Amino acid sequence: MKLGYKKWAKKVKYGLRWAIEGIFSSIKRKFGEDLRARSLIGLLAEAMQKVWAYDVMVSYAKNAMLMA
């Protein structure tokens, strides 16, 4: 059965990628594109630390705006 474009887009969640790409872009602007670790475990840990730090910064900014 062939779906129309709108139903297909909703089913496969088409169009949500831009939000994730925006977050990745923000992380790269804040912390740079490079990872300095050499091992796979180190690379994953470093990337997770950048994502964690970005999340903390965003949470702090949201809380600060609510308090103002």
Image (spheres, rainbow, N blue to C red):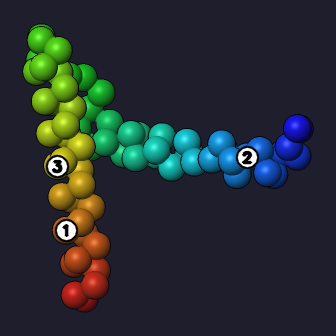
Q: Answer with mark 2 or mark 3, whichever residue precedes in sequence.
A: 2
Query: Dot 3: what SS?
Result: helix
Name the amino acid type tagged 1: Tyr
Check disc 1 and report the residue beneath it. Answer: 60
Which residue is rendered at x = 86% and y = 43% of the image?
3
Q: Quadrant of residue 60?
A: bottom left
Q: Residues within 10 Å of mark 2 (few under 14, many from 20)?
A: few
Looking at the picture, tell me which residue is in the foreground, 10 or 28. 10
Q: In front: mark 2 or mark 1? A: 2
Figure check: 64 above or below 22: below
| Left or right: residue 59 compared with residue 41 | right
| Left or right: residue 7 compared with residue 47 | right
Looking at the picture, tell me which residue is in the foreground, 31 or 62. 62
Please identify the quadrant where the N terminus is shown. Answer: top right
Figure check: 52 above or below 45: below
Check disc 2 and report the residue beneath it. Answer: 9
Query: Dot 2: what SS?
Result: helix
| Left or right: residue 7 compared with residue 63 | right
Figure check: 22 above or below 62: above
Query: Dot 1: what SS?
Result: helix
Q: Please say whether residue 36 is visible from this viewpoint.
A: no
Q: Report x, y in % for residue 48.
A: 19, 37
Name the amino acid type tagged 2: Ala
Residue occupying the far top of the picture: 38
Figure check: 19 above or below 68: above
- Label 2 and label 3: CA atoms lie apart by 33 Å
Q: Report x, y in % for residue 50.
A: 19, 40
- Label 1 and label 3: CA atoms lie apart by 11 Å
Check disc 3 and report the residue beneath it. Answer: 53
Residue occupying the far bottom of the picture: 68
Please identify the quadrant where the C terminus is shown. Answer: bottom left
